[in-house]
Image (cartoon, rainbow, N blue to C red):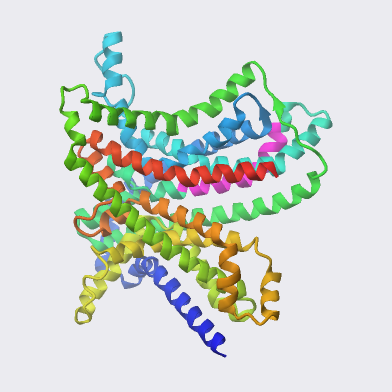
Amino acid sequence: MLDIKSDRAVRAVLLAVAGALALPVLGVLGAWFAVDAGSWALLRHQWDTVLPGYAWQSFWLVAWVAVGVVAVGGATAAAVTLFEFPGRRIFEWALLRPLAMPAYVLAYAYTDALQYSGPLQVMLRELIVARGALWPDVRSLGGAVVLFVACLYPYVYLLARTALAEQAAPMMEAARLLGAPLRRRVLEVALPMARPALAAGMALALMETLADYGVGAYFGLTTFTTGIYKAWLVMDDPLAAAQLASLLLVLVAVLLWAEQRAQARLRFAGGRTAASGSGTEARPVVLRGAGRLAAWLVCGLPVLLGFVLPVAWLLRLLGQQTGGGDDGGEAASVLSASYLGRFVEWSFTSFRLAAIAAVLAVGFALLLAFALRRARGPGGAPVRAAAQIVSLGYAVPGAVVAVGILLWSGAMQTHAPALGVTGLVTGTVFGLLYAYLVRFSAVALQSVQAGYARVPVSIDESARLLGAGRRRTFVRLHLPLLARTAVAAALLVFVDTMKELPATLVLRPFGSDTLAVVAYQFARDERLAEAALPSLAIVAVGLLPVILLSRALRARQAH
């Protein structure tokens, strides 16, 4: 009886936490239920002024990014999966490295390298005796498209590579035995099999593109995300920000629906193809001559543009700071003792917030996944609904989360000043951690659920027959089995929190800056040399889950 009561109490707490994580999104959507004549007038004013520009530029941004990530991700996945050439094993893991590079860090590096007054253009103009710019301005819509493609194509590459290896490769081998030429095998067998994976990866990349604030603000783009911050922070108009946030949320919801539908088709196709092609051993096509060179270019350029060159440029900036630079000592003062001391403070703040968010998210995910494992039948509907709510959090852009939290905070300050909650959310560590949990609890939950999928249900039945209660089963059996999964989930949340910019920029406590925030602020003030060190620190931390992912893929291939 005590175990049942405690189980009900835990379930009630889990439902309450899941409901709290849904409040920011409900706050944004709830703004439409409080509309009046003034609200509609504001919406019409936005439609006549800024809204078409936000919609038009956001549309072209996601349209070109979609084309780019599908082309690059699909081509690289096909190259390393369907063909054999020297260096293929290296490219298999190297193509994942841009996942560690936030788009705003790419923007800082390429802006410093390719701007009109940058060293590359100055040197080339001196060599060819030219005066004008040698290439278009990086800080433009086209430049943003290239940067997003360079760092987001791994979403498509990863899913397409798995689909091609498990589904298309055996079918291509069967087509080869039937006498089909290579071109036909690729166009009529491999690519159609990979369509669901391409669509799912594209949807994930586009959600990241719509959620971005750093690149859009730094490049001066008029997207929905930058418009949200302008409406709130510049125009001081919470209602306009909420209306824009709700429109952005609708776009993200459409992409999330498309991604989930593509994932469902991918699972169905995978099961069907595995059964049909399990008896045929797939062999990659050996490339020689021009084909080998093409494969090197297809796989090498994304790695160079998305990881190697920006990291090398940031290291160059850092080397100039430590070595005195080209300006006779001015750059040497950038890495002074005071700057390094502040860098330690920024790193400590980032690591502390990321560690707390990781522990809270994984702890909540473990409890919710355990409750979900036991939530069978009609009585488990509330727990399953809570899991669905939490799973949607990662798709919600940080700008929407920030606006939703600020709306609730404003309502509390207006209607409940006597409760002493006026300073509970905005400008506090609590509010910042709240935003992190809203966004990244889904990452932890998905990882834990994947770990639970490998734990047989028979273990629970054996524990029940031996008289072990639910608490003992969870602590003595499940937690040891899920230890590695929990660590991996914590690492993913930790890295995502380190890179998060939009919500941190608005909700952080005064004087408590993270590495992402200071890198953005330095770059915004055109102090790119000072932005190099925090940017490199973010990239270094982001490499950790990429390395683990690479090892997991290698182990899977070995089996």
* Residue 553 as seen in the image, left or right of residue 394: right
Quadrant of the image occupied by residue 118: top left
Q: Residue at x 33, y 30 (%)?
A: 315
Left or right: 230 as drawn, with respect to 288: left
x and y percentages locating residue 35 in the rendered image: 30, 70
Q: Is residue 523 left or right of residue 281?
A: left
Q: Nearer the viewer, residue 122 or 238?
A: 122
Q: Which residues are magenta?
A: 186-206
Query: Which image quarter: residue 193?
Result: top right
Q: In the image, is residue 153 above or below residue 296? A: below
Who's the residue at 30% across and 65% down the image? 431
Quadrant placement of the C terminus = top right
Q: Nearer the viewer, residue 12 or 456?
A: 456
Q: Is residue 423 visible?
A: yes
Relative depth, front residue between 329 and 257: 329
* Residue at 35%, 69% in the rendered image: 27
The reply, left or right, for residue 308 in relation to residue 524 is right
Magenta span: chief secondary structure: helix
Tell which residue pokes out farthest to the bottom in this image.
1
Q: Any magenta on residue 197?
A: yes
- Confirm whether residue 372 shows in the render: no
**Up/down of 277 relative to 472, above or below:** above
Q: Is residue 379 above or below residue 219?
A: below
User: Residue 104: percent from the left, percent from the top?
Assistant: 34, 41
Residue 17 included in the magenta stretch of the image: no
Residue 6 lies, with reference to residue 140, above or below; the image says: below
Q: How many marks?
A: 0
Is the N terminus in the top left, top right, bottom left or bottom right quadrant? bottom right
Q: Position of residue 166 (x, y in %)?
A: 70, 44
Q: Residue at x 30, y 55 (%)?
A: 504
